[in-house]
Amino acid sequence: MLLLNKILGFFSHDMGIDLGTANTLVSVRGDGIILDEPSVVAVKRGTNKVLMNGQAVGSAAKAMLGKTPDGIEAVRPLKSGVIADFDITEAMLAYFIRKVHKRRWGVRPRVVIAVPSGITTVEKQAVYSSAERAGARKIYLIKEPRAAGIGAGLPVEEPQASMVVDIGGGTTEIAVMSLADIVVAKSLRVAGDSFDEAIRNHLKNAHNLHIGEQTAERIKTTIGSAFELDEEESLEVKGQDVTVGLPRSCIVTSQEIREALRHPISEILRTIREVLERTPPELSGDLVDTGLTLCGGGALLRGIDRLIEEETGLPATIADDPLTCVATGTALFLENLDRYSAILEAEEDEGHS
């Protein structure tokens, strides 16, 4: 069976998938990241029918967020890092797998999928089933912080502490690893989407202005910060007046956005401290020198590394390419399946055929 898998693997585009709440990245063995698209699908409202023969997925669907007519809905099928809509997730995965794999000679690919460390058995089953029905030949699951650590180039196989804080769209994954496995981990359903929601709430409460998801994300990436800036900034924001329902704009400052982000960031800091308190003393001692590595889109929020350093007293380093760490890690696992098989969760280990 092992030999057969190797032969089939030679003829297929085996792939690693970072199935994220905000974006899905696909990495192919030997080729790196070859797909990076929003985890959004456009459907006929009230149904799970994907528009345009399944083509309204990813970037095309994200462009429709908040701008669809009554008969169309742009949907994010993952919430807080897990599948919220099984059918739409399956359609999205099938589209991405076909786009990458192109079904060469009918050989289906092996797939490694990164999942939150706090995923439940039911949620695992949803991932397995979606990937299998979407066209995967064999499915492995890997916990996101482990994949992030591998992808960030940390020495996770060594008998020393490697700590990852992966701030994604739906979840923040915080883990301390040693000897290629997770020692302490916590999955927090507060992350980039929570930042966006905090900004939307602030605009509504402080400026009586309704804004959409994409506008909130633009504010976050343009003037958002977790730590005081050397030069504070401002931005004109356009939306809908809460009182009269008419279009209007207002000016927001980086100071007020930082204050709006204080609560979700405080939740992440609290969870980092909780993981550190549960870390065994010898590994805790390692972290004094090695510190922690920030991955995920949230790592790009300006000053978040400085704030974490101030709050924990540990060095905080942003990974070289924080957005792709998890996807890169899944591909590296694919390249070393024989070595890592003991710590991968394969279908048969979970009672799947």
Image (spheres, rainbow, N blue to C red):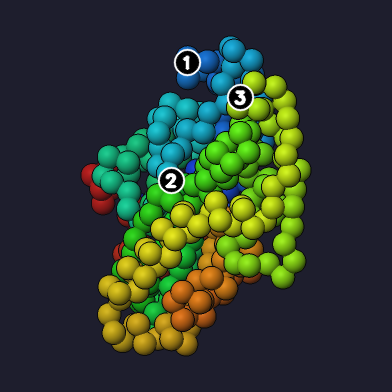
Residue mark closest to the camera, 3 vs 2: 3
Residue 190 appears at what percent x and percent y?
Answer: 43, 51
Q: Residue at x 67, y 56 (%)?
A: 254
The local secondary structure at tag 3 comes to loop
Query: Residue 177 falls in which quadrant of the image?
Result: bottom left
Residue 313 appears at what percent x and percent y?
Answer: 46, 81
What is the number of the mark on residue 81?
Answer: 2
In space, the residues marked 1 and 2 are separated at their CA atoms by 22 Å
- Residue 191 vs 278, above or below: the answer is above
Residue 133 appears at what percent x and percent y?
Answer: 42, 31
What is the number of the mark on residue 243?
Answer: 3
Residue 67 appears at what percent x and percent y?
Answer: 66, 24
Which image quarter is the C terminus in?
top left
Contact between marks 1 and 2 (CB within 8 A): the answer is no
Neighbours of disc 1 within 10 Å: few (<14), some (14-19), many (20+): few
Mark 3: amino acid: Thr
Q: Residue at x 56, y 43 (%)?
A: 202
Q: As drawn, is 239 to the left or to the right of 118?
A: right
Residue extending farthest to the top is 71
The local secondary structure at tag 2 comes to loop
How many marks are shown on the rendered structure?
Answer: 3
Q: Residue at x 59, y 57 (%)?
A: 258
Can residue 118 be seen in this snapshot? yes
Residue 117 or 250: which is nearer the viewer?
250
Residue 104 or 134: which is nearer the viewer?
134
Q: From the image, tell me which residue sits under label 1.
A: 47
Query: Residue 33 falls in which quadrant of the image?
Result: bottom right
- Residue 10 vs 336, above or below: the answer is above
Mark 2: amino acid: Gly
